[in-house]
Amino acid sequence: MSAIILFLAAIAAIAGWWLSQQRLAAKPWLEEGVIADWREESPSSVPPAKIGLGVFLAVVGSLFALFISAYSMRMNMVDWRALPVPKLLWFNTGVLVTSSIALQWAHMAARRNDTDGVIIGLLAAGASAVIFLVGQLLAWQQLKVAGYFVASNPANSFFYLITAMHGLHLMGGLVALGRTTAKVWRGAKMTQVRLSVELCAIYWHFLLLVWLVLLGLLTGWTDGFVDICRQLLT
Amino acid sequence: MVDIPFDTVAGIPPAEVGEVELYHPKSWWTRYVFSQDAKVIAIQYSITAMAIGMVALVLSWLMRLQLGFPGTFSFIDPNQYLQFITMHGMIMVIYLLTALFLGGFGNYLIPLMVGARDMVFPYVNMLSYWVYLLAVVVLASTFFVPGGPTGAGWTLYPPQAILSGTPGQDWGIVLMLASLILFIIGFTMGGLNYVVTVLQARTRGMTLMRLPLTVWGIFTATVMALLAFPALFVASVMLLLDRLLGTSFFMPTLVEMGQLTKYGGGSPILFQHLFWFFGHPEVYIVALPAFGIISDLISVHARKNIFGYRMMVWAIVAIGALSFVVWAHHMYVSGMNPYFGFFFATTTLIIAIPTAIKVYNWVLTLWRGDIHLTVPMLFALAFIVTFVNGGLTGLFLGNVVVDVPLSDTMFVVAHFHMVMGIAPIMAVFGGIYHWYPKVTGRMLNEALGRFHFWVSFLGAYAIFFPMHYLGLLGMPRRYHDIGETAFIPASAHDLNAFMSVAALIVGFSQLVFLFNLIWSLFKGKEAGGNPWGAASLEWQTPQTPPGHGNWGKELPLVYRWAYDYSVPGATRDFVPQNEPPARLLAQGAHP
């Protein structure tokens, strides 16, 4: 359970930092009148949707941290036979990085009010995300042909489960991306879609980060780190 | 008093919200059924939760009938008994209490108490309810599928949860896990709303340290639930795969009915870690909103400011953080490393400190207060007594050496029913009697309320107080029939019969409550806007029940905390949060 504990410690640190800005030592029973609120002080107050996405990313992060926890607890049992990682995953990773870059580009284009750039960025990001998902399915196919079925070894089960979870989250993101693209396509003003594009970009970067961590775990690169974490707890 | 310079007041424009930002229902369907108004969603959540809760109540009757009069009711066989236990536990903990506190009270009170027009994402909020309803329907459907609901116990421990000896192995367990996954998805949608609304939609002047403790409790509980429910999600998905695809995440190599199963090498302990990583925060997800509600009820009905507001807030946050590092105290007998047991016993006992601070502060709020023994106040006092009671037996069970012999006895059942069954339900009832006038504009009937309170309170003690004693005798939990057992005297069976009769009476008294809810809706005394003389914002709405958008043209401006009761020199014994200080009134400000 060390991965989730580390993750929650990070969340707690962020929450603690935020709380420390909130005058928690105030004595409300002595303070009458209007207190200048921090949200009025700052001109660029963060839109609720962005905060909402941040909270959602914390939830998704804790979900994957729990999968990683379960993975690292299960992998040191005797029946664990690590499966060969298909070469295709490296290609897929490259495609996902491209997708993220394209969205970042769309985000920057939206800030410049460059509608064409936004559309190109969004379409490129969506297309490469779809290619990534197809690539993941092909990787499953290759493993199946090679005889690595979902139930034949816990390493296989975890591989399929974790990649499926990541893929499902990306598919959810594609829905939001599709809606944003449709809005831009229909000629919505840049000021109306700027936030949506930015939120998509944040979500994409987050899923890329999650994927890189998962890839490290699945290929065994992070085994040394996992061992250190495990020793921390024992 | 320290004066905050309010020269800035004139510089703050009135917070008018443009009409376009508000959701407008266009038809009967979107107004009452597919509504995006948090108040309607709250009522939908509450009704659904109470309806499925009634099912769980009937299940508890059936269990008590079997325990009190073994052999008399031939229609309850051992398999059914296990199914009743499982469904009763799961419904009460998740589908009733979690949904009612966060979906019901949270949706109704958060926007009103922080001075917002609605939740920040109304559409997602509506989806949250419909996904929850779907989860409830899937759960209820397990009563009608072949094999019936799962009988794995509410903890659903593998390997037994998915082996053929357990009732509901075909459909019950699959639908149960599917329902939990749906519930978590629905809850996450709602939870995002509650958190972001508290963070971003507070009205001007409503700093975090001016929030009523109810909002603090619900807010912290929601944050915890958002981070803890993924653990149940992961555990459910993996167990579902073990059951459906034959993977071995949790299933060890084992022989079933003389046959070697296809499973091999999985770790049942892993499931326990994941389950309790959710399961322990869940206790506080239910308790923290109750803490908050009780703090507000006591302050209003004792006409006194809450004692130690800052400490109350800090204690809520501390309990929320600590509750993530105590999960393995549910696993002392699971065979894990004994050093873990020592660590988790320590953290468990540390939680007693912030919890005790809260209890002291409630008692000190009551001290020399002008206590009105209204029905909400009675329930609030009952909560404190019951929570202390359950908390003290928690200290027993938190210690490894005491827990090991008491584990899986009725003592554990008595403990958790006191601390997270009776106590939160007392808070729910107190909250409903308190806020019903705001929701409907009418008071609940006082006499029926008192009858409901005394029967429920004394009856609950008649059920669960003797249960501690049965547990100390060694009477095991989850047994369909104890039979002739040398160490259990005949008198214990008489006690069981007594408890069962009490349970039936308490159950029936809830019908009085339901009758009261419906009857008062039409015939109750007109309440007016603020029948209790409460200071927090939800009682200051221009209309009762609050209209669409909650407030008039302008959002309220908050000048003080929510607990200005019996202020010396004030004209009334309470000062609403949005009432300007006297000097500002003289300058022409208006509330």
Image (cartoon, rainbow, N blue to C red):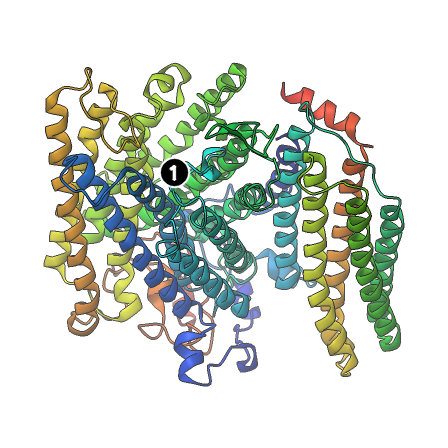
Disc 1 is attached to a residue of which chain? B
State the image quarter where residue A13 is shown: top right
Q: Is residue A89 left or right of residue B513?
A: right
Crowding around mark 1 (Cα neighbors within 10 Å: few <14, some 14 to 19, many 20+) is many
Q: Amino acid at mark 1?
A: Gly
Instruction: Inspect this view and state whether residue B579 appears.
Output: no
User: Which residue corresponds to mark 1?
Assistant: B153
> Which of the two residues, B246 or B298, is positioned nearer the viewer here?
B246
Q: Residue at x 56, y 81 (%)?
A: B20
| Quadrant including the N terminus of chain A | top right
Residue B450 lies, with reference to residue A175, above or below; the image says above
Looking at the picture, how far across and down is residue B48, in whole percent? 35, 61
Q: Is residue B360 left or right of residue B267?
A: left
Looking at the picture, how far across and down is residue B278, in whole percent? 50, 39
Q: Is residue B256 left or right of residue A162?
A: left
> Which of the two residues, A194 or A106, is positioned nearer the viewer here?
A106
Looking at the picture, how far across and down is residue B306, in whole percent? 33, 45
Looking at the picture, how far across and down is residue B574, in whole percent? 28, 57
State the image quarter where residue B239 is shown: top right
Q: Residue at x 37, y 66 (%)?
A: B44
Secondary structure found at label 1: loop
Q: As drawn, which residue projects farthest toward the front? A: B258
> Which of the two residues, B199 or B561, is positioned nearer the viewer here?
B199
Q: How many marks?
A: 1
Q: Is residue B569 left or right of residue A25?
A: left
Q: Residue at x 45, y 44 (%)?
A: A27
Q: As drawn, which residue projects farthest toward the bottom? A: B26
| Quadrant including the C terminus of chain A | top right
Instruction: Inspect this view and state whether residue A85 appears.
Output: yes
